[in-house]
Image: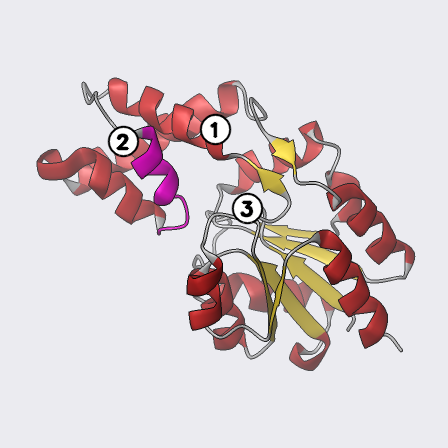
Amino acid sequence: MDIAIFDFDGVLIDSKAGYVSSLIDAAKSFSITGLSSDELALRMNFPMDSQLQYILGNTHTTEREDALLACFRRVCLEEPALGVTTFPGVFDMLNHLTDTGLVLGLCTNKPHDLARVVLRELELDQFFTFVYGGDAGVKRKPAPDMIYAILNDSGVATSRAVLIGDSVSDIEAAKNACISSVAVSWGYTSRDRLIAAEPDHVFDDCGEIVSYFTEASL
């Protein structure tokens, strides 16, 4: 393999607490209260429009959805790394992969500017050559467009690329782009749902990812 393309939330960073808190704060600006933190957390890997429509309920309009999304982004950018941590082993894994000469990309439905800020705040930006966020001008996952953009920028063939994610949409995006897929079980989707989506591999810790790429380079 020549390039590893990572999803962000649920793979490299645990952002659940801050994400849910920001959604609740944004919803309050629309006089929406009483939202369940647990229910919002369960929906983290749903498409963003689906999450916003759930929050707005019967008050939903396209205009209110756009306004809520803009408000959510403003709230997130006020304290972008609040409550956000890297998962165990992430730094060692990324150091190992880059030391072996593997190129790393980031492909996230998270807003592009927010992803960039969080990468910098957590000192993860040093590892990634290519970064595409959900509003970087190409379609979000499960569409393959962000993956194609990274492959085009890097000049890497589909046969030499793999996507590492924690959601069904990540696996579908990899399949749509005709690249290999690795699902991680420590994120925001159950292992059973990941297996049902038929990724090429399912790994339970960062060490298994290191071993996978070590073996692939032999």
Residue 17, numbered circle: 1
Q: Residue at x 71, y 41 (%)?
A: 88
Magenta range is 37-46
Taking depth in this image into account, of 155 and 162 the one nearest to the observer is 162
**Does residue 87 appear anywhere in the picture?**
yes
Task: Name the quadrant of the N terminus.
Answer: bottom right
Taking depth in this image into account, of 204 and 139 the one nearest to the observer is 204
Q: Residue at x 83, y 57 (%)?
A: 97
Disc 2 marks which amino acid? Ala
Other residues around mark 3 within 10 Å, as few (<14) / some (14–19) / many (≥20): many
The chief SS type of the magenta part is: helix
CA separation, marks 2 and 3? Answer: 26 Å
Question: x%, y% of residue 142?
Answer: 43, 64
Taking depth in this image into account, of 35 and 203 the one nearest to the observer is 203
CA separation, marks 2 and 1? Answer: 22 Å
Q: Earlier in the sequence, mark 3 or mark 1?
A: 3
In the image, is 122 to the left or to the right of 68? right
Question: x%, y% of residue 116?
Answer: 62, 37
Q: Please say if 6 is above or below 60.
A: below
Question: x%, y% of residue 161?
Answer: 69, 72
Disc 1 marks which amino acid? Ala
Please report contact status of discs 2 and 1: CB closer than 8 Å, yes or no.
Answer: no
| The quarter of the displayed image where residue 82 is located | top right
Residue 10, numbered circle: 3
| The quarter of the displayed image where residue 40 is located | top left
In the image, is 154 to the left or to the right of 149? right
Q: The residue tagged with tag 3: helix, strand or loop?
A: loop
Q: Earlier in the sequence, mark 2 or mark 3?
A: 3
Q: The residue tagged with tag 2: helix, strand or loop?
A: helix
Label 2, on which residue?
Answer: 67
Other residues around mark 1 within 10 Å, as few (<14) / some (14–19) / many (≥20): few
Question: x%, y% of residue 108?
Answer: 53, 50
